[in-house]
Image (cartoon, rainbow, N blue to C red):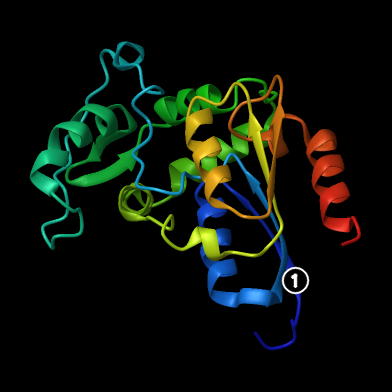
Amino acid sequence: MPGLDRFSLVGHSLGGAVALAAALDAGAAVERLVLLNPAPAGRFFPLSRLVDPGLFNGTEFIFLEPPRDGGFPGRESNLPWLTRELAPLLRNKTGRKIAFNRAALGSLLAAAMPTAPRNDFFERLVEDAAAADPKIFLAYLWALRSLDLSPRLPGLATPTLLLWGDLDTVVPLPAVVHLQSLLPRRQLQIINGVGHSPQVENPPLFADLAGEFLLSPG
């Protein structure tokens, strides 16, 4: 990588898997990793515990079919999951146009980050998510469904700090413990009283934990 001989990476959720993949490819160039509530090492499909269809009664939903180009492995078997879990997040806005249901996205983020203040920053997160092309969201879910770094992780020599909030409803603790078991040089810190996004729910504590690890000698 031009201009960067050595660097550290911090990744959250799917970004944690991206950071792991980058470290596997970059080798010794990555000095340290900090992974916050990272996506599990093996294939993973979230959301089933986050979406309560009862919250969205009266909303006109649409149902999506998986991509016809074969993008979803075993797409026929995934269709019931897609219709059940994505319907509350998507609605028919104007004719064929597909747009996110903002209220559903707000409920989703609130469930994932239960202790995050409902302030202007939180509203900006919802607005950013609502403005995204739904295809991005589907691609995100496909990545979680198909990504499996576990065979390569035992060979990763990068020191890694795993942070997990004990109120996380997206990534379960057993998945993080399994990831921990695959990494040779790792430590796991469980943060009490936060959910899926410690950096949003308790920024000072996250900064202290990550900074101490990143700046420590050795």
Horizontally, is 129 left or right of 184 in the view? left
Query: Element type at marker 1?
Result: strand
Question: Quick one: quadrant of the N terminus?
Answer: bottom right
Location of residue 135 with respect to 106 vertically, above or below: below
Name which residue lies at 33% across and 26% down.
48
Q: Is residue 24 left or right of residue 41?
A: right
Based on the displayed image, in which of its 4 quarters is residue 63 positioned? top left
Percent of width and height locating residue 160: 69, 53
| Quadrant occupied by the C terminus | bottom right
Give the camera-side residue of 202 and 95.
Answer: 202
Asked if residue 162 shows in the view, the reply is yes
Q: Which residue is mark 1?
A: 7
Q: Residue at x 55, y 53 (%)?
A: 15
Is residue 62 left or right of 172 when viewed as pictured? left
Image position, residue 39 (x, y; %):
49, 45
Q: Residues within 10 Å of mark 1 (few under 14, many from 20)?
A: few
**In the picture shown, does residue 163 fall above or below 18?**
above
Name the quadrant containing residue 194.
top right
Question: Which residue sits at x=20%, y=33%?
Answer: 81
Q: Which image quadrant is residue 164 in?
A: top right
Outermost bottom residue:
2
Decide if residue 172 is in sight here: no
Q: Position of residue 84 (x, y in %)?
A: 21, 27
- Identify whether 40 is placed above or below 119: below
